[in-house]
């Protein structure tokens, strides 16, 4: 009886636990008997699951032991393999050291030869990459690259044929540097279009096409391209040479570099006279206009005075006064007044000369003013350009001397223009003024003679 009560208490306790753990089951039970039945079923299920879990733990423990034993066997095998590899490595190092000793012993003086060969091949590769000759013999660069790779690898030795070819390529480069050769190749135009053209190579200095255009060798891709800006001064020579079949022809060679050296680049980058003139800006245009005006005035006055000088010379040979020239108009006063007293005649003649002088010296003062103003205008342009240059330096800094020098060069153009206008204007003024003074001197001379003759005639009467 007591034992049954104990079991009931245990079951009741278990039922309480089960009910506490599974509230959903307690909610489904409709009576205590039904709840007790459900608790018993849950207990049986838990016991079965615990037994299965225990069996899985035992099996897993066996598998872990099996895996551990397998790992120990693998570790032992790898340690043995590592020991064997270390032993083999030491043996190979010994063999390699011996082989290197044998190689060095057998090479002997060839080591020095191969060193020179490697150095020469490196120099050749550098020269071939920038040489115009590579346009015709592009495969030689690949040969040199392969040879250098072989020499650097130290696994193969160069053959006699390869050594001889290095000498051959070196000799061919020297020979081709003194030849003028015509061949056909791909040329890239200034617009980026590629076409097959006949090209003339002048040694390792320059290359031109049949149109007389200078070409630039682009080492990166081994092609020729037309220079975007040509040295126009030498293009005629280049065209004559490109279309010639034999004989001697003048040609502009750039000795500073085979791929368009510094001299050719400086020549191309140098601005033309027109570009220099435009660098003067507004002040330069004003100076040019003033200079053109001075030139026109000087030419006009030279023509007028030359014609007047011829008429005066013709008047000197004639006894009758002609009013188509200044001397004739002065002499006509004497012809019209033969009985006039000497003092009055002298005044009349002086008056006539004074009337002729402004016509003869017309615009000479304007030439003198232009000769004086032109350098001042040039100085004005220079000062203005320097102000603009220093403003640019203030904004962008002085890190680029080339840009700063370009600005200063442009500023000095106006000074050059001012001097270019002033110097010829001074000379023209002097020349024109001399022609005018010559005619005026003739007028004074003839007037003085007339007065003298007139005075002597009146004194004799």
Image (cartoon, grey):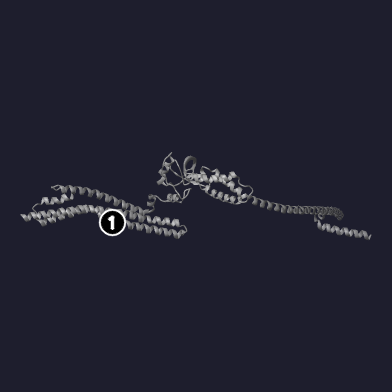
Between 46 and 392, the one lying in front of the other is 392
At 12% from the left edge and 52% from the top edge, which residue is drawn?
334
Taking the view exactly as shown, the residue that stands out farthest to the left is 461
**Looking at the image, can residue 440 be seen?**
yes
Between 195 and 129, the one lying in front of the other is 129
At 91% from the left edge and 60% from the top edge, which residue is drawn?
6
**Looking at the image, can residue 142 be seen?**
no
> Image quadrant of residue 22?
bottom right
Quadrant where the N terminus sits is bottom right
| Total tally of numbered discs in the picture | 1
Quadrant where the C terminus sits is bottom left
Rendered position, 9 above or below 260: below
Taking the view exactly as shown, the residue that stands out farthest to the top is 245
The answer to whether 277 appears left or right of 438 in the picture is right
Q: Position of residue 210 (x, y in %)?
A: 44, 40
Q: Position of residue 185 (x, y in %)?
A: 50, 40
The answer to whether 67 appears left or right of 424 in the picture is right
The answer to whether 360 appears left or right of 164 in the picture is left
At 59% from the left edge and 45% from the top edge, which residue is drawn?
160
Q: Position of residue 364 (x, y in %)?
A: 25, 54
Between 40 and 266, the one lying in front of the other is 266
| Label 1 Cα neighbours within 10 Å, binned few <14 / some 14-19 / many ≥20 | some
The local secondary structure at tag 1 comes to helix
Rendered position, 29 above or below 187: below
Residue identified by numbered label 1:
369
Rendered position, 165 above or below 385: above
Q: Position of residue 250 (x, y in %)?
A: 41, 44
């Amino acid at each position: 009886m007591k034992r049954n009560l104990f079991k009931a208490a245990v079951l009741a306790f278990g039922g309480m636990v089960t009910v506490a753990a599974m509230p959903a089951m307690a909610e489904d039970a409709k009576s205590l008997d039904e709840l007790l039945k459900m608790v018993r079923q849950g207990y049986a299920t838990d016991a079965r699951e615990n037994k299965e879990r225990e069996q899985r733990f035992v099996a897993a423990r066996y598998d872990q032991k099996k895996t551990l034993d397998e790992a120990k066997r693998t570790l032992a095998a790898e340690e043995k393999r590592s020991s064997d590899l270390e032993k083999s490595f030491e043996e190979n190092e010994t063999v390699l050291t011996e082989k290197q000793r044998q190689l060095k012993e057998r090479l002997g003086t060839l080591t020095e030869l191969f060193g020179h060969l490697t150095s020469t091949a490196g120099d050749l590769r550098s020269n071939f990459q920038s040489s115009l000759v590579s346009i015709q013999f592009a495969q030689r660069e690949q040969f040199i690259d392969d040879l250098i790779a072989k020499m650097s690898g130290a696994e193969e030795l160069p053959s006699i044929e390869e050594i001889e070819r290095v000498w051959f390529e070196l000799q061919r480069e020297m020979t081709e540097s003194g030849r003028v050769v015509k061949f056909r190749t791909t040329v890239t135009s200034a617009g980026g279009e590629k076409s097959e053209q006949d090209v003339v190579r002048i040694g390792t200095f320059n290359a031109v096409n049949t149109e007389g255009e200078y070409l630039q060798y682009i080492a990166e891709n081994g092609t020729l391209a037309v220079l975007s800006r040509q040295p126009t001064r030498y293009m005629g020579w280049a065209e004559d040479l490109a279309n010639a079949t034999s004989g001697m022809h003048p040609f502009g060679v750039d000795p500073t570099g085979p791929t368009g050296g510094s001299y050719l680049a400086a020549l191309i980058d140098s601005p033309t006279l027109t570009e220099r003139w435009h660098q003067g800006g507004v002040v330069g245009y004003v100076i040019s206009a003033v200079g053109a005006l001075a030139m026109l005035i000087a030419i006009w006055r030279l023509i007028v005075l030359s014609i007047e000088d011829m008429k005066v010379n013709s008047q000197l040979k004639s006894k009758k006064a002609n009013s188509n020239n200044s001397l004739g108009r002065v002499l006509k006063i004497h012809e019209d007044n033969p009985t006039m007293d000497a003092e009055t005649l002298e005044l009349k003649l002086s008056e006539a000369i004074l009337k002729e002088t402004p016509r003869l010296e017309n615009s000479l003062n304007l030439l003198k003013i232009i000769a004086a103003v032109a350098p001042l205008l040039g100085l004005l342009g220079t000062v203005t350009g320097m102000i603009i240059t220093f403003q640019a330096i203030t904004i962008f800094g002085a890190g680029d001397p080339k840009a700063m020098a370009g600005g200063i060069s442009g500023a000095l153009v106006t000074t050059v223009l001012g001097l270019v206008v002033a110097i010829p204007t001074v000379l023209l003024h002097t020349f024109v003024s001399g022609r005018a003074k010559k005619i005026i001197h003739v007028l004074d001379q003839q007037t003085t003679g007339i007065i003298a003759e007139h005075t002597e005639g009146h004194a004799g009467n």
